[in-house]
Image (cartoon, grey):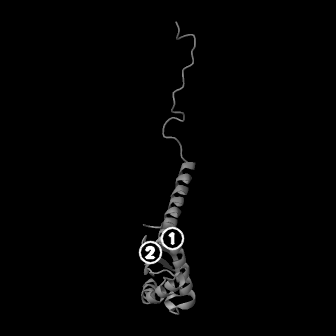
Amino acid sequence: MVDHARARRLSKRITQIVAAALEHEVKDPRLKMVTITDTRVTGDLREATVYYTVLGERVDADPDAAGAAAALASATGVLRSMVGAGTGIRHTPSLVFVPDQVPDEARRMEELLARTRESDAEVARLAASARPAGDPDPYRVPREHDGADEE
């Protein structure tokens, strides 16, 4: 039987333990700019997928994602031991580290929104000076009756 509430609590706790361990315990310089964003635990509490991002020091600097992935792979055993000690559960889940795609998708969405704003501004600029192609009032106006038509 799957206890989703317990899996959620365990995933939050694993996120806290791994983030604190990366900040204070693990001394690999490649993990200096790694941030743990989320953790998902399977229903049987046997496997945990830990999502992380690698932040760059500057906007134009490309973060070393391959180095961070290698450092996390080498520190997996130590981090799993810390998770086991910090949670106190009978079976410590195996840890799998996956780069988080949310920041890349958010950046892509921001670029799409910026392009949309630019095209909307261009359409508004063109519409401001536009004139109708046909008559100024294309709708039919009912004729006014004068006395000559009735005879």
Foreground pick, 121 / 13: 13
> Which mark, by number, is residue 69?
none
Foreground pick, 97 / 149: 97
> Which mark, by number, is residue 6?
1
Percent position of residue 31, x then y: 51, 87
Foreground pick, 121 / 103: 103
Looking at the rendered structure, the kind of residue marked 1 is Arg
Looking at the rendered structure, the kind of residue marked 2 is Leu
Farthest-out residue, top: 151
**Residue 43 drawn above or below residue 78:** above
Secondary structure beneath label 1: helix
Percent position of residue 149, x then y: 52, 11
The tally of labels here is: 2
- Please give the residue where the numbered disc 2 appears in the rendered image: 45
Mark 2 or mark 1, which has the lower sequence index? 1
Secondary structure beneath label 2: loop
Foreground pick, 143 / 60: 60
Percent position of residue 64, x then y: 46, 85
Residue at 54 percent across and 10 percent down: it is 148
Residue at 51 percent across and 87 percent down: it is 82
**Residue 64 drawn above or below residue 109:** below
Rendered-image quadrant of the N terminus:
bottom left
Is there CB contact under 8 Å for labels 2 and 1?
A: yes
